[in-house]
Image (cartoon, rainbow, N blue to C red):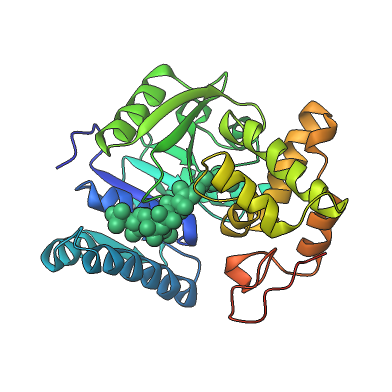
Amino acid sequence: MTESSFSRVGVVGLGTMGAGIAEVLARGGLAVVGVEVNQDALDRGRGHLEVSTGRAVKRGRLTEEAQREILGRTVLSVDFAELGDCDLVIEAVPERLDLKRRVFAELDRVCREDAVLATNTSSLSVTDIAVSTRRPTKIVGVHFFNPAPVMKLVEVIRTVLTEPDAVARVAGLVRALGKTPVTVGDRAGFVANRLLFGYLNQAVAMLESGHATRDDIDAAMTAGAGLPMGPFTLMDLIGLDTCQGVLDAVHAETRERRHAASPLLRELVTAGLLGRKTGRGFYPHDGSATGEPA
Ligand code: 3HC
C-alpha cells in the first residue's frame, strides 16, 4: 500500500492521460474516483483502464487478482458529487482554459474545503486556473508524462500562491507511487517540455526543408542518440494538437524562434491528423501505406 497523506483521490477526465493517472493511483493502493462528462466518455475511460491493466497481466507484471483489485478500487461516475470525499482531485480534461476553469469552479463547489486540487495541464498557466477558484493556495500542477503508467517523471508545479504544504504533500504522493517528482515554477513548458519541444519542432523544420526524411530523422535519434523513440514517433504518441498547444504556449512566453510551431505541424493539426489517437499523424497508425507526410 502507498504511504501517502492522501487516501481518496479523484481524477476528472479519463482520456489517455486521465485514465493512465487513475491506473497509477489505483495500482498504488489508493481509492480512486474517476469522473467523466457523459456515459460514452466514461465507458471509453473504463476501456483504457481495462486494456492497460490487461496488458500488464499478459506480460506477467500483474496477477489477474491484482487487476481485479485495481479495477475494484476505482469508482467511475458521471457525477461530480462523487468527488466530495476526496482529499486530492487531479484534473485531466482537454487543454482549454475555459473548460478547465469550469471544471475547477465545479470542483470548488463539491470538494471539501481542505482538499487539494491539481491540474495535469501541459501548456496552460496553473496560476490562471488557481485565481479562478476560491482556494488558490490549494491549487498545484501535477504534470504526468505519456504513457503515465510507464514514465517516471512527474513535475509538481507551484504558483506564487500555492501553500508549501500542498506542494510537499503532492510531491510525497508522487514518491509513494514510485515516481520521481521535480518541483518547478509556473512557466510555460515547465522544465521537460520547455527543453523537449524545441527539439521536436526542429525535427519538423528539418523534414519540411527536405534536409532528411521522417524515417531517417527518427532512425538518427534512436540508433544515434539512444532515445527510445524518434521525434516523429514521439509526436504521434503525444498527439500533434498537444504538441502545437505546448509550442504555442512556450512561444508566447519566450518569443524564441525554435518554439514557433512549424507550418507542417499546423497543417497536420488543421487537417485533423493528430497521431495515434486519430489513426494518422506523421505516420499512419491504421494499417495504411507508410508514406512520408511531406
Ligand atoms: N500504457 C501502459 N503501459 C505501457 C504503454 C501504455 N500506453 N506503452 C507501453 N507500456 C509498457 C509496456 O507494457 C511495457 O511494460 P513492462 O516493461 O512492464 O512489460 C513497457 O511499457 C515497455 O513497452 P514496450 O516494450 O511495448 O515498448 P517500448 O520498450 O518501445 O517502450 C515506451 C514504450 C515506454 C513508450 C518508450 O518507447 C518510451 O519511453 N518512449 C518515449 C516516451 C516519452 O518520451 N514520453 C514523454 C512525452 S512528453 C509528455 O508526455 C509531456 C506532455 O505534456 C506532452
3 to 243, vertically: above or below: above
Judged left or right of residue 254, residue 235 is left
Q: What x and y, as percent, mark residue 210?
A: 86, 54
Residue at (29, 31) in percent of width and height: 175
Residue at (42, 68) in percent of width and height: 45
Quadrant in the rendering for residue 289 = bottom right
- How many dots with numbers? 0
Q: What x and y, as percent, mark residue 128?
A: 65, 34
Residue at (65, 55) in percent of width and height: 232
Residue at (24, 52) in percent of width and height: 27
Quadrant in the rendering for residue 287 = bottom right
274 to 238, vertically: above or below: below
If the image is split into quadrants, where does the N terminus sit? Answer: top left
User: 283 or 125: nearer the eye?
Assistant: 283
Q: Is residue 294 visible?
A: yes
User: Residue reaching furthest bottom?
Assistant: 288
User: 189 or 157: nearer the eye?
Assistant: 189
Judged left or right of residue 60, residue 168 is right
182 to 110, vertically: above or below: above
Judged left or right of residue 221, residue 71 is left
Q: What x and y, as percent, mark residue 167?
A: 41, 24
Q: Is residue 80 visible?
A: no
Judged left or right of residue 102, residue 116 is left
81 to 43, vertically: above or below: above
Q: What x and y, as percent, mark residue 163?
A: 44, 20
If the image is split into quadrants, where does the C terminus sit? Answer: bottom right
